């Protein structure tokens, strides 16, 4: 297990942020994952783990304290030196990590002061103030009972000097950003699906899923959705495409009117899709607030149907902060944890596989450093091999432009294997077997004429009936960097829907 810490710069364009190959995020280090099982008292163990996290983060972020206050000369991408002030701008993480960073208790909001029994209300609460928190944590060096009492009164965990205490120009409570993956997809939508299954029953929901006609933009669940385990955020996103269609005309047990239920589901879906917009205006933000208001006006149907007793859920309360966070930090795709979850593959899983399972952290960091040096050297070689864009000297005949070569990049394993008949029916490759025979004949007789190739292709025996099928082929530019320039996607055709 590894707890990696990533860092990026806020002014990098989003089209680079979303591509791990562009190295827009860097790995700062690994936080220890020890549970400190040697401590017998559970409360003391949890406090020690939290203090260990903040101590490690303080060590990692210590180098930006002085440059953040006085500034440091840095050269930007255009070659101009500027005085920059690197500061801690925002924190991206799920709800347990947010409470750990802000030193707030579980079941509370890390951004505002709201009582646990008021989390389900649609209203604005006073924000948490950094100055009051700093005044509380100053007492960490005093007697323990005085410090614990002050933290208890402030609603904060008694952490010994949080890492953000010494960071300049930082408001940790405002720096907490929304998280579409864990708050909306794995939080709100997961609970909503559970409520609908409790209302209509798993049999009816799965029957509706099996009745969905094939569609290129909808993922089909032939066995239903109620039997799935460990559903990912991507699968929840696919389920939201047809969720409203599953219940729009289903009668509610007991003969109740389903209008409020449909409005609640639609409002949450509207909020989900509006929150994922890559560009926002005042109108779209107002629509997000209106969708949330519609849900709160009709959510009592879940209490009437006895699937919920209250809505004092932190992830539902977090929806009230989306509009203000978008106005402050931009669209949610800038700080979605889907990106950091993807980075775990490159910086944690692949690095771990390269070790011998002994002293893994030192081996992982060494392997990552060497890989980064190879990538930097590869980019340098690619830069030197690029075409010189300067105009040629006077009197020199310019050379014709060189057409960059492209190579094909394919996955290691095919998507599936298909017979020749299936290729003709599903993919439209009617002449694939004949073309394959001609290719083999041309490969064996490179200098033969077209007529000879055609005659030998007719006599070529192909000793197999299935071939591997790849649904995605990527084309990379010439050179060691392997930069992807284009890609081709293929999808099997959908057969006629039976009446």
Image (spheres, grey):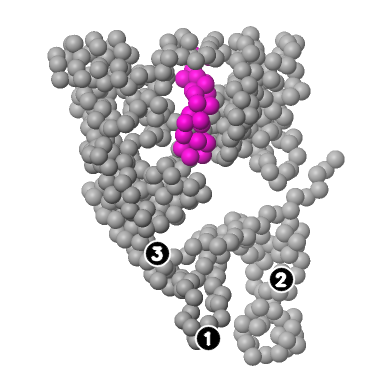
Residue drawn at x 71%, y 90% as measured from the top left: 449
Residue 460 location in percent, x, y? 69, 80
Residue 335 location in percent, x, y? 46, 37
For mark 1, what is the residue? 397
* Left or right: 28 as drawn, with respect to 196: left
For mark 3, what is the residue? 379
Q: Earlier in the sequence, mark 1 or mark 3?
A: 3
Q: Which mark is residue 433?
A: 2
Read off the magenta span: 311-336
Residue 261 location in percent, x, y? 68, 18
Q: Earlier in the sequence, mark 2 or mark 3?
A: 3
- Of tags 1 and 3, the one toward the viewer is 1
Rendered-image quadrant of the C terminus: top right
Q: Earlier in the sequence, mark 2 or mark 1?
A: 1
- State whether the magenta stretch is mostly helix, strand or loop: helix
- Circles 2 and 3, Cβ within 8 Å, touching? The answer is no
Residue 361 location in percent, x, y? 26, 47
Above or below for 374 versus 9: below
């Amino acid at each position: 297990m590894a707890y990696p810490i990533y860092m990026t710069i806020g002014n990098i364009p989003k089209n680079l942020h979303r591509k791990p190959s562009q190295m827009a995020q860097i790995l700062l280090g690994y936080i220890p994952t020890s549970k400190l099982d040697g401590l017998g008292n559970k409360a003391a163990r949890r406090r020690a783990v939290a203090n260990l996290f903040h101590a490690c983060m303080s060590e990692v972020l210590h180098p930006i304290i002085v440059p953040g206050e006085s500034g440091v000369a840095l050269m930007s991408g255009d070659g101009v030196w500027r005085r920059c002030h690197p500061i801690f701008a925002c924190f991206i993480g799920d709800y347990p990590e947010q409470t750990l960073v802000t030193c707030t208790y579980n079941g509370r909001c890390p951004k505002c002061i709201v009582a646990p029994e008021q989390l389900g209300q649609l209203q604005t609460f006073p924000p948490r103030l950094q100055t009051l928190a700093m005044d509380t944590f100053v007492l960490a060096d005093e007697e323990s009972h005085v410090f614990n009492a002050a933290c208890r009164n402030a609603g904060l965990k008694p952490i010994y000097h949080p890492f953000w205490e010494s960071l300049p120009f930082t408001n940790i409570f405002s720096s907490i950003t929304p998280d579409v993956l864990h708050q909306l997809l794995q939080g709100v939508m997961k609970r909503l699906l559970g409520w609908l299954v409790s209302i209509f029953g798993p049999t009816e929901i799965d029957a509706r899923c099996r009745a969905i006609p094939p569609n290129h933009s909808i993922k089909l669940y032939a066995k239903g959705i109620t039997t799935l385990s460990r559903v990912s955020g991507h699968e929840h996103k696919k389920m939201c495409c047809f969720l409203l269609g599953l219940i729009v005309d289903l009668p509610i047990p007991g003969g109740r009117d389903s209008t409020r239920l449909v409005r609640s589901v639609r409002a949450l879906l509207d909020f989900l899709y509006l929150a994922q917009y890559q560009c926002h205006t005042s109108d779209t933000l107002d629509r997000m607030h209106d969708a949330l208001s519609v849900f709160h006006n009709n959510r009592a149907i879940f209490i009437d149907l006895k699937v919920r007793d209250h809505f004092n859920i932190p992830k539902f309360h977090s929806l009230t902060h989306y509009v203000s966070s978008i106005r402050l930090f931009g669209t949610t795709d800038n700080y979605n944890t889907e990106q950091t979850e993807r980075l775990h593959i490159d910086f944690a899983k692949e690095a771990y596989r390269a070790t011998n399972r002994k002293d893994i952290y030192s081996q992982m960091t060494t392997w990552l450093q060497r890989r980064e040096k190879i990538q930097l050297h590869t980019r340098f070689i690619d830069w030197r091999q690029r075409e010189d864009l300067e105009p040629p000297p006077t009197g020199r005949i310019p050379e014709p432009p060189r057409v960059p070569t492209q190579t094909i990049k394919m996955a290691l394993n095919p998507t599936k294997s298909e017979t020749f008949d299936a290729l003709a029916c599903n993919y439209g490759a009617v002449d694939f077997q004949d073309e394959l025979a001609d290719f083999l004949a041309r490969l064996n007789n490179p200098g033969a004429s077209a007529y000879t190739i055609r005659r030998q292709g007719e006599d070529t025996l192909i000793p197999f009936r299935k071939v591997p099928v790849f649904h995605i082929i990527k084309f990379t530019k010439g050179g060691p960097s392997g930069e992807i320039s284009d890609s081709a996607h293929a999808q099997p055709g959908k057969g006629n829907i039976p009446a």
